Amino acid sequence: MRALIEEIFVRDLPPLSVPGRGLEAMDDGAALWLGDRWLVVTTDSHVVQPIFFPGGDIGRLAVSGTVNDLAVMGATEVLGLTCAVVLEEGFPREELERIQASVRGACREASAPIVTGDTKVMGKGEIDGIVLTTAGVALTDRVVPDSGLAPGDRILVTGRIGEHGMAILSARHGLRLEGELLSDVAPINGLIRAALAAGGESVSAMKDPTRGGLASALHEMAGKSGVGILLDELAVPVSPAVRAASELVGVDPLVIANEGKAVIGVRPEAAERVLAALRSHPLGREAAVVGVCLAERPGNVILDTGFGRRLLAEPEGELLPRIC
Amino acid sequence: MDSPAALAAENTRLTAAIGQLKFRDPALARRLAETIGRVTAEIGRSPVSVMHVCGSHEQAIARFGLRATFPKDLNVIMGPGCPVCITDMPEVDEGVALARQGLVVASYGDMLKVPGTRRSLADAQAEGARVEVVYSAAQAVELARRLPREQVVFFATGFETTAVATAAVLIADPPENFSVLSAHKYIPPVMEIVAEMPETRVEGFLAAGHAATITGWGIFEGFVERHGIPVVVAGFEPLDILAGLARLVELVRDRTPRIVNMFPRCVTKRGNLRAQEQLWRVFRPLGGRWRGIAHVPNGNLRLREEWAHRDARRRFPIDLTLLWDEEPAALAQECICGDIMSGIASPSDCSLFGKECVPDTPVGACMVSSEGTCKIWHQYGGLPDLRGAL
């Protein structure tokens, strides 16, 4: 996917009209310098099957995804969101109402107003149910890129990983584990605000570990920052339910998507302070320091399994079930 | 039993059970690694070469990064233990031909990309042939029930572990439109071949716990006697593997060729007699090629005469001339998968590795399966040496 984006979309880009970081940075959003502050902009299209899943639905996902993309750029006060809906002809009205209620609920949690929107209907079979596209804008004094890690920095995650992807996987394949597997989908700009208030300039990089999970996020951060990352697998918070399900289906929690978590790089002297701030927030109680940045092996993520060490692979493609 | 409450209770029990697995104790792992290091040093030769013959062992070694804890003087060779990798080209050709002849071919997911002489099952599928991925032999039977108007052929691959499952579904009287194209392989004979290869110099074998669960550890007694090489049966948790290796290097050090069962919670001397009875009721051993390795006497499992009515090779004419008209792929000639599977070459010795041969477009079988050496090297950055402090 990243290769496709780089080959098709990130070429022959016209120059930015103001100084800033645009598409070529391939960060969670763009940051444009307005002379006194940064305007952060991001957009995301959301498709998910099933539309309603344990712990959330496409509406909550659409708001959280965009709010969190802004937040991990350092912009936690959302000026406004847009929401465009494309519906398949015959999409049930009551389901649409449920989704809208969920959009409103997530907006309230994030203090993020929807300021404009659009609705289109496509023919039966031309689209799979519903697609939600949200965009968001926010102002910030300091942009936190995903490329600012330096050797010695600590890597924090804000909670238990793998919950969104495993809930979806379980619901989609009828694993009948739904009772204990709930998506973590949530807007976390408040949590990030607490981390930034505690860490200030010492927060060196942030990313939301969505598709490809923690493994993908760390690879991207390590590659762009030119550092190696030593990840302590036993320190990574994983719920017993996600661990059990991942053993059953043979998918590593490290590559499973999250929708309410952030990966935060912090200078070593501020790590404990930021960790304490995260843990005192309701959405960050399980936050943990999970790794450290190295000057060696730039771009690589080395996994200390507790039993030995290996390079953590960057997740790729669709996994085919194994023979045994 | 299937009530939501009962299922939830079962999930909770399962979750708790996995949480309490005692096979994942890092402190114990460190002590075992120290033992392996100390005993290897006591042997006082370099390298000491031992071989495992199971892709699941390599998978666990890679997953838990155990290689970083092995001493430099211990060479743990990956043997011919990947069932996908050793399925021979003509066997894949048979599956491809049947699919192109209009039959529904069902197979395990990681067989799809394995190259035949010219085509893989995935290629045949892309050209419109009906190829279905199944998770088990039982699921292939389900498929046949769902498609009563089609002929469904289960392309059955894997060692005695999966062959038992194939035997079980045949004995359970599947629908008439279900048949089996057996490419099953039998592990014990290939260990004889590898033990006799002068290049490998294997001093000890780590045998696969799941295969031994069925065959019993007693099956290795004759082998140990004939070759004077110790065999340790080991399970698949990191501690199982480390404990197995520690015992194996002790046996090498003490020059005591014997068989030791380090997986007693599953493996007995006689094994699973009922499974063996079913296995040999349906299959007979037959000599045949393992891809890249050799002709292995008694290494293939073929359906017995009594099961001819289920044997795709006897039920349907398999027209391989359709495939032979075409030139074999030129790149395949350069592939050294065989040497890699025999443990006498590394992927880095191959001119195709990481260039023409990558997981998306594999040339050799070792790049296909998640248990294949080349795939594992490619995925984990060429088994980098991560020993020592960073």
Image (cartoon, coloured by chain):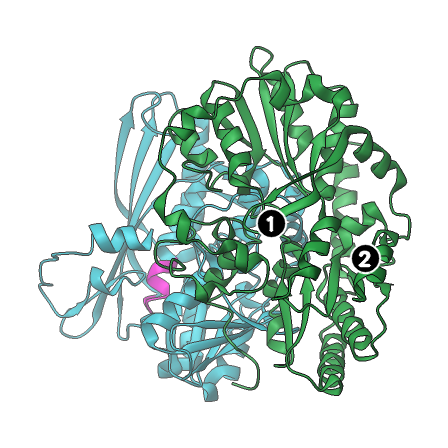
Chain colours: A cyan, B green
Q: Nearer the viewer, residue A133 or A75?
A: A133
Disc 1 marks a residue whose amino acid type is Ala
Determine the secondary structure under disc 2.
helix
Q: Position of residue A252 (x, y in %)?
A: 57, 56
Q: Which mark is drawn over residue A283?
A: none
Residue at 43% x, 41% y is A58
Residue A248 part of the magenta-drawn span: no
Determine the secondary structure under disc 1.
strand
Q: Nearer the viewer, residue A290 or B282?
A: B282
Whole-angstrom CA distance, mark 1 to mark 2, is: 19 Å
Q: Position of residue A75 (x, y in %)?
A: 32, 66
Q: Are marks 1 and 2 on the same chain?
A: yes
Residue at 45% x, 30% y is A95
Residue pointed to by mark 1: B294
Q: Residue furthest top?
A: B149
Q: Which mark is drawn over residue B223?
A: 2
In the image, taking residue A64 as reference, residue B271 lies left or right, namely right
Chain for mark 1? B
Q: Is residue B134 visible?
A: yes
**Quadrant in which residue B276 is drawn:** top right
Disc 2 marks a residue whose amino acid type is Phe
Q: Residue furthest bottom?
A: A269
Counting residues from the N terminus, which is met first, the one under dot 1 or under dot 2? Answer: 2
Q: Position of residue A202 (x, y in %)?
A: 39, 83
Q: Which residues are magenta?
A: A68-75
Q: Position of residue A171 (x, y in %)?
A: 57, 39
Q: Nearer the viewer, residue A179 or B362?
A: B362
Residue A72 part of the magenta-drawn span: yes
